[in-house]
Image: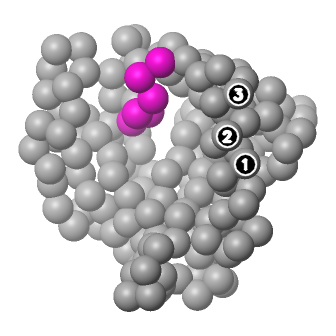
C-alpha cells in the first residue's frame, strides 16, 4: 500500500459498497460510499500502522490497478500483540482467479514473519466462496455470532475463524 494508491482505493471501496445490494454475502461493512478525504484518512492510518509494525498489508494489482486489499492488524495491548485480525477484499471482476488465495497465503506468511502467533477473521456464514479460501489457508471455525448483520432485511450469522501460525 502506498499514497499513490489513494484514487484506486476510493474507486475500490466504492465499487464494493455498490455491490452490497446485489451481493449480500459480501462482508464489506461500509454503509455508504467514501469520499476521497475519508479514504485519505483511512490510508494515512494504514500507512502509519504499517510503518509502526502494527499492520501487515498486501495489495493485488492487475495492470497497475488495485484489485484486492488485505491486512492483518496486530492486537494493541502487550497481552494481545502476538495476535492479529485479518480483513481482505477482492474486486468483483477479479474473484475466482486465485488472487484471494494468494493474498491469504502472503498475509499468513508475513504475519508469521513479524512474530504473530495467531490470526482471526470473521466471515458471513452465507459466504461459502470466502469460507472455502480461508479453510484452504488453514483457518478453522472458532465460533459463531448469530444474527450479527442485518442486510437486505435478513439477519446473517458471522463465523469467527482462526489459525495458529
Residue on which the image places disc 1: 44
**Residue at the image point whose x is 68% and y is 75% from the top:** 53
The answer to whether residue 152 is above or below residue 51 is above
Name the spot of residue 70 as percent of width and height, x first: 60, 51
Left or right: 65 in relation to 23 = right
Residue 94 in sight from this viewpoint: no
Name the spot of residue 44 as percent of width and height, x first: 72, 48
User: What is the distance, in whole Å, between disc 2 and disc 1 at their CAs?
Assistant: 5 Å
User: What is the distance, in whole Å, between disc 3 and disc 2 at their CAs?
Assistant: 6 Å
**Residue at the image point whose x is 33% and y is 52% from the top:** 122
Q: Dots 3 and 2: beta carbons under 8 Å?
A: yes
User: What is the distance, in whole Å, between disc 1 and disc 3 at their CAs?
Assistant: 10 Å
Res. 16 image quadrant: top right
Name the spot of residue 152 as percent of width and height, x first: 24, 14
**Is residue 85 covered in magenta?**
no
Res. 38 image quadrant: top right
Which stretch did the figure color magenta?
27-32
Q: Residues within 10 Å of mark 3 (few under 14, many from 20)?
A: few
Residue on which the image places disc 3: 37
Q: Residues within 10 Å of mark 2 (few under 14, many from 20)?
A: few
**Residue at the image point whose x is 43% and y is 80% from the top:** 77
Res. 55 image quadrant: bottom right
Q: Dots 2 and 1: beta carbons under 8 Å?
A: yes
The answer to whether residue 131 is above or below residue 156 is below
**Residue at the image point whose x is 55% and y is 18% from the top:** 33
Q: Main secondary structure of the magenta part?
A: loop
Amino acid at each position: 500500500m502506498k499514497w499513490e494508491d489513494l484514487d484506486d482505493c476510493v474507486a475500490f471501496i466504492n465499487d464494493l459498497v455498490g455491490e452490497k445490494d446485489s451481493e449480500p454475502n459480501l462482508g464489506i461493512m461500509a454503509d455508504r460510499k467514501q469520499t476521497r478525504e475519508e479514504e485519505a484518512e483511512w490510508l494515512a492510518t494504514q500507512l502509519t500502522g504499517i510503518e509502526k509494525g502494527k499492520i501487515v498489508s498486501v495489495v493485488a494489482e492487475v495492470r497497475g490497478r488495485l484489485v484486492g486489499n488485505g491486512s492483518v492488524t496486530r492486537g494493541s495491548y502487550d497481552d494481545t500483540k502476538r495476535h492479529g485480525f485479518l480483513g481482505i477484499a477482492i474486486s468483483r471482476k477479479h474473484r475466482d482467479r486465485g488472487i484471494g488465495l494468494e493474498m491469504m497465503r502472503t498475509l499468513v506468511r508475513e504475519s508469521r514473519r513479524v512474530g504473530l502467533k495467531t490470526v482471526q477473521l470473521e466471515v458471513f456464514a452465507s459466504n461459502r466462496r470466502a469460507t472455502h479460501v480461508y479453510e484452504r489457508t488453514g483457518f478453522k471455525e472458532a465460533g459463531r455470532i448469530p444474527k450479527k448483520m442485518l442486510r437486505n432485511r435478513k439477519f446473517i450469522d458471522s463465523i469467527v475463524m482462526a489459525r495458529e501460525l
